[in-house]
Image (cartoon, grey):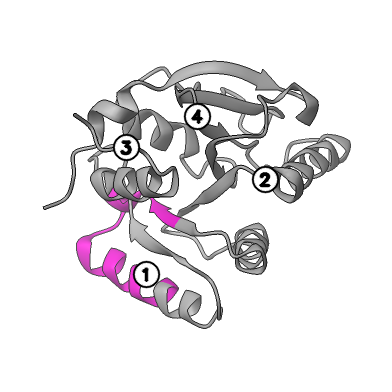
Amino acid sequence: MQADWSKFFRRASFRLAAGQRVQLPADEGYEVAFAGRSNAGKSSAINVICDQNGLARTSKTPGRTQQLVVFDLDDQRRLIDLPGYGYAKVPVAMRKDWRDLVDGFLRERRCLAGVVLLSDVRQALTDFDRQMLDWCRSRQLPCLLLLTKADKLNRGPAGGRLQAIRHELSQLEGLTGGCQLFSSLQRQGVDEARQWIATALKAPPSP
């Protein structure tokens, strides 16, 4: 029987937004980072996983947030919302700043225990998605790929996309984690995502 992690994730609270890595909490404990292209539904996923509608704020201008947003679950476990990537209207200089910020975080953060990568199920994996998957593989870091907005496709096509992408991931030798359909609107895949994240964070069982 799958554990109920809803109470654990409801503890999530905003801690800070860091424009530079030196502003982050001490590099200890366990962190899971959320990554994905702008408009992939990252903020909505964090909100539904934590069962708090306004926890991660959605920007009216996609791709403008260029900070690492930290949410505490307890004194040793955190979620990190990485800046959305790839929005065409964002100036080139700002995109470079994001890349430097995110690359540095991924390279140097020793307490990073896993990555949740979000990608719209209706679209092909982007170069950024593949770079993130390859980076996780090279660092032997587990990565959960959430195929978001699954409610936008009928069950058959959604299942077909899931199988195709799972096959693609199986070709990446050494990559660990998983791939699943996810819908913030219909709460599809929420319990499975919570279980995966809690395991990566080595969270204690809920009382």
Q: Is residue 192 above or below residue 82?
A: below
Residue 2 place in picture, x, y as percent: 16, 50
- Quick one: SS at disc 1? helix
Label 4: how many residues lie within 10 Å, few (<14), some (14-19) or many (20+)?
some
- Magenta span: 145-165
Choose between 162 and 131: the one closer to the eye: 131
Label 2: how many residues lie within 10 Å, few (<14), some (14-19) or many (20+)?
few
Q: CA distance from mark 3 to mark 2?
A: 21 Å
Amino acid at dot 1: Arg
* First along the sequence among labels 1 and 4: 4
Whether pointer 3 and pointer 4 mark residues with C-beta atoms closer than 8 Å, the reply is: no
Amino acid at dot 3: Pro
Which residue is painted at 40% across and 73% down in the image? 166
Q: Quadrant of residue 122?
A: bottom left
Which residue is painted at 56% across and 34% down in the image? 80
Return the residue at label 4. Answer: 76
Choose between 202 and 163: the one closer to the eye: 202
* First along the sequence among labels 3 and 2: 2
Outermost residue, left side: 1
Outermost residue, right side: 93
Check residue 161 in the rendering and tell me which mark sits there, or answer none.
1
* First along the sequence among labels 1 and 2: 2
Check residue 104 in the rendering and tell me which mark sits there, or answer none.
none
- Quick one: SS at disc 4? loop
Viewer-nearest of labels 1 and 4? 4
